[in-house]
Image (cartoon, rainbow, N blue to C red):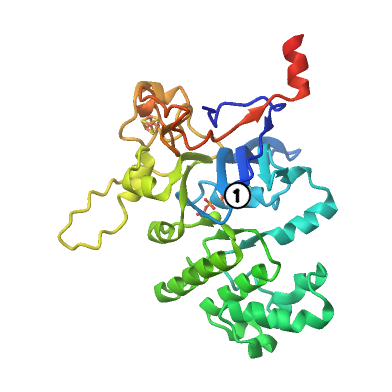
């Protein structure tokens, strides 16, 4: 079994498995902290610090965790929207996203889209919505000119917008309608993968349900794959097939939704999930309150990054970073509590999370 936060030699090549539209291995994104008279780099914000997961085509992975744990940066780094990555691999349909040329990246942008939390600020106030939805379609020449209007009408219709509203401006729509416009703008490019970054957090509960249903319908119709970032665990439970739990730049637990919700293993996941309201008024909530605030990603604690807040912290947790282990098929956790639990045997494992093959460079080094 490969371990995701054990540094893998850079020369190891990630083996593409076609069932996965996206394969992410040990992804890191650090932001420079500059200071002093010379404005030199004096440190780094380790926003994403070794994230590994695979995402199956046509499925949804929910990404949860407290504010500032690196969810948005993970999504943006996968899409190559935050400059260079610091380390790791991002394979989209088997190709390293960071190896694409400028022209290839332009094409890739149509295949990988993002929907943001605040639909208003991500829509230009000066353009009518027909233009907003169609702008990139025209730029990429995705449909012949003669079919353009009909195409935009069809996309709007699929997203629950009336084509006659094409000439209206974003401020003339409600929050839910604006999010539909953002979804239509993304869908118009015929994407395969969409990062949904808190797409319903700014909306009323009833509108949230409509948008979630729309995303589900579009996923079925277009075989879309989503990375769904959210604070709202009920929403994540509703929409996801797999779930990743992030803490301070790391994925501390990852697996099938049913396993993560029914049997959370990591103390952080347990605490996070203990806050989910129980619909039964007679049921007692055993809420685990996390002490203290999330440490700074510029200066994360040694050993297990969660040890400063973990009620189950042991001596070794303060010094040694735990490694990822598959505890039940497809269910991975990064915690010393499971050091003595045997990992899933290879025959039972869903599949190794990371498969690497030796490159010619490696083989030569081994022979030397
Ligand atoms: N461009 C940037 N420059 C420097 N630091 C950044 C930058 N973008 C994000 N960060 C920092 O990286 C960390 C992770 O931020 P990120 O936005 O990914 O968190 P998040 O999990 O999406 O939080 P939220 O739930 O509040 O949206 C934070 O400490 C943030 O301040
Ligand atoms: S490794 Fe230790 S400190 Fe970290 S979550 Fe597990 S028990 Fe808690
Ligand atoms: Mg965010």
Q: Quadrant of residue 358?
A: top right
- State the count of labels: 1
Task: Check the image and report above or below for 5 versus 142.
Answer: above
Q: Residue at x 69, y 27 (%)?
A: 12
State the image coordinates of residue 90 (x, y, percent, origin top left). Answer: 66, 43
Residue at 74% x, 76% y is: 134
Q: Is mark 1 within 8 Å of ligand 1?
A: yes
Q: Residue at x 37, y 49 (%)?
A: 258
The extreme front residue here reads: 347
Mark 1, Cα crowd under 10 Å, few <14 / some 14-19 / many 20+, is: some
Residue 23 in the image, given as x and y percentages of width and height: 62, 43
Is residue 52 in view? Answer: yes
* Residue matched to label 1: 73
Work out whether residue 290 can be spotted. no
178 in relation to 329, above or below: below
Q: Is residue 300 above or below residue 137?
A: above
At which x and y percent is residue 33? 66, 41
Left or right, 269 with reference to 174? left
Left-right relation of 242 to 47 = left
**Residue at x 17%, y 57% (from the top left corner):** 283
Q: Of residues 127 and 347, which is closer to you in this image?
A: 347
Q: Residue furthest left?
A: 282
Q: Is residue 234 left or right of residue 366?
A: left
Task: Work out whether residue 162 or residue 178 is closer to the camera in this orientation and state it.
Answer: 162
Local SS, label 1: helix
Q: Quadrant of the C terminus?
A: top right
Residue 107 x, y percent position in the rendering: 78, 58
């Amino acid at each position: 079994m490969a371990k995701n936060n054990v540094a893998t030699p850079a020369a190891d090549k990630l083996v593409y498995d076609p069932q996965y539209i996206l394969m992410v291995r040990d992804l890191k994104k650090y932001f420079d902290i500059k200071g002093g008279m010379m404005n030199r780099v004096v440190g780094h914000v380790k926003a994403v610090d070794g994230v590994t997961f695979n995402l199956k085509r046509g499925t949804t992975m929910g990404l949860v965790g407290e504010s500032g744990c690196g969810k948005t940066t993970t999504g943006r780094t996968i899409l190559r929207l935050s400059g260079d990555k610091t380390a790791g691999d991002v394979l989209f349909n088997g190709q390293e996203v960071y190896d694409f040329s400028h022209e290839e990246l332009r094409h890739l942008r149509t295949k990988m889209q993002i929907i943001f939390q605040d639909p208003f600020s991500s829509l230009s106030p000066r353009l009518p919505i027909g233009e907003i939805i169609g702008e990139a379609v025209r730029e990429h020449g995705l449909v012949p000119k003669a079919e353009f209007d009909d195409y935009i009408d069809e996309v709007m219709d699929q997203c629950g917008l009336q084509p006659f509203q094409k000439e209206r401006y974003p401020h003339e729509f409600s929050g839910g309608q604006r999010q539909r416009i953002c979804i239509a703008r993304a869908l118009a490019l015929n994407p395969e993968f969409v990062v949904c970054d808190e797409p319903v957090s700014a909306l009323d509960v009833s509108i949230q349900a409509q948008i979630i249903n729309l995303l589900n319908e579009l996923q079925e119709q277009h075989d879309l794959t989503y990375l769904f970032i959210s604070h709202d665990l009920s929403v994540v439970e509703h929409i996801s097939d797999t779930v990743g739990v992030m803490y301070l730049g790391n994925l501390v637990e990852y697996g099938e939704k049913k396993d993560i919700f029914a049997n959370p293993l990591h103390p952080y996941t347990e605490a996070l999930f203990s806050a989910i309201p129980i619909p039964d008024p007679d049921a007692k909530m055993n809420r685990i309150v996390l002490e203290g605030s999330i440490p700074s990603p510029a200066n994360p604690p040694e050993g297990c990054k969660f040890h400063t807040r973990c009620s189950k912290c042991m001596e070794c947790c303060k010094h040694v970073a735990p490694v990822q282990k598959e505890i039940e098929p497809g269910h991975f956790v990064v915690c010393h509590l499971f050091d003595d639990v045997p990992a899933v045997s290879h025959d039972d494992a869903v599949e190794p999370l990371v498969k690497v093959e030796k490159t010619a460079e490696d083989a030569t080094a081994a022979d030397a």
